[in-house]
């Protein structure tokens, strides 16, 4: 199995295990067009190292994960978001992406909450902060439409 076969198998694993087997869902999550993913999956085009690294980062996988040989005994890692390990993988990944897109001040607030709070209060605060971060990202677009 060459590196492109390994990356293709790993891509299929991510789609099946995190995105209900739907290429379009992963494409939307990665902010890509589905045909690119279909070219990778069909083998018509190889998955470049930079693309694999970018997907690892966006999905919340360890660096180099797409290059590890597929092994049924190695489950797809679930992104951790702090105190609540019962967060569904897709929600956890979206929270992580929101955190990555946030400015340094917002990230610092989230870090403080996650470090200091435990249990239900921490989960509620984390959810509220994540919702506020998502709303703040949408706000500039709404202002442009009304201006």
Image: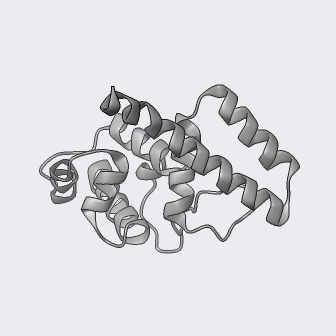
- The colouring scheme, among rainbow, by chain, secondary structure or one colour, is one colour
Task: Where is residue 131? Give x, y as percent.
Answer: 58, 50
In front: 75, or 27? 27
Residue sitting farthest toward the front: 146
| 104 is higher (above) or lower (below) than 84 | above
Task: Where is residue 62? Give x, y as percent.
Answer: 55, 48
Residue sitting farthest toward the left: 44
- In this orientation, does residue 53 appear? yes
Task: Where is residue 68? Give x, y as percent.
Answer: 46, 54
In front: 136, or 26? 136
Q: Residue at x 33, y 57 (%)?
A: 26
* Quadrant of res 100: top right
Would residue 139 be found to the left or right of residue 35 on screen?
right
Would residue 125 be found to the left or right of residue 75 on screen?
right
Task: Where is residue 98? Give x, y as percent.
Answer: 53, 44
| 7 is higher (above) or lower (below) than 49 | below
Quarter of the C terminus within the rendering: top left
Quarter of the N terminus within the rendering: bottom left
Would residue 135 be found to the left or right of residue 114 on screen?
left
- In this orientation, does residue 81 appear? no
* Quadrant of res 83: bottom right
Q: How many marks?
A: 0
| 34 is higher (above) or lower (below) than 108 | below
In front: 120, or 24? 120
Q: Residue at x 36, y 73 (%)?
A: 20
Q: Residue at x 42, y 49 (%)?
A: 67
């Amino acid at each position: 199995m060459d590196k492109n076969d390994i990356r293709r198998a790993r891509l299929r694993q991510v789609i099946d295990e995190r995105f209900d087997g739907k290429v379009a869902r992963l494409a939307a999550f990665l902010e890509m067009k589905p045909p690119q993913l279909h070219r990778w999956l069909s083998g018509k085009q190889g998955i470049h190292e930079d693309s694999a690294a970018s997907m690892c980062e966006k999905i919340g996988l360890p660096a180099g994960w797409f290059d590890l040989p597929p092994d049924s005994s190695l489950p797809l890692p679930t992104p951790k978001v702090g105190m609540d390990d019962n967060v569904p993988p897709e929600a956890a990944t979206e929270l992580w992406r929101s955190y990555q897109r946030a400015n340094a001040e917002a990230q610092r607030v989230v870090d403080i909450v996650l470090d200091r709070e435990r249990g239900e209060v921490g989960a509620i605060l984390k959810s509220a902060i994540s919702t506020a971060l998502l709303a703040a990202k949408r706000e500039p677009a709404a202002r442009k439409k009304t201006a």
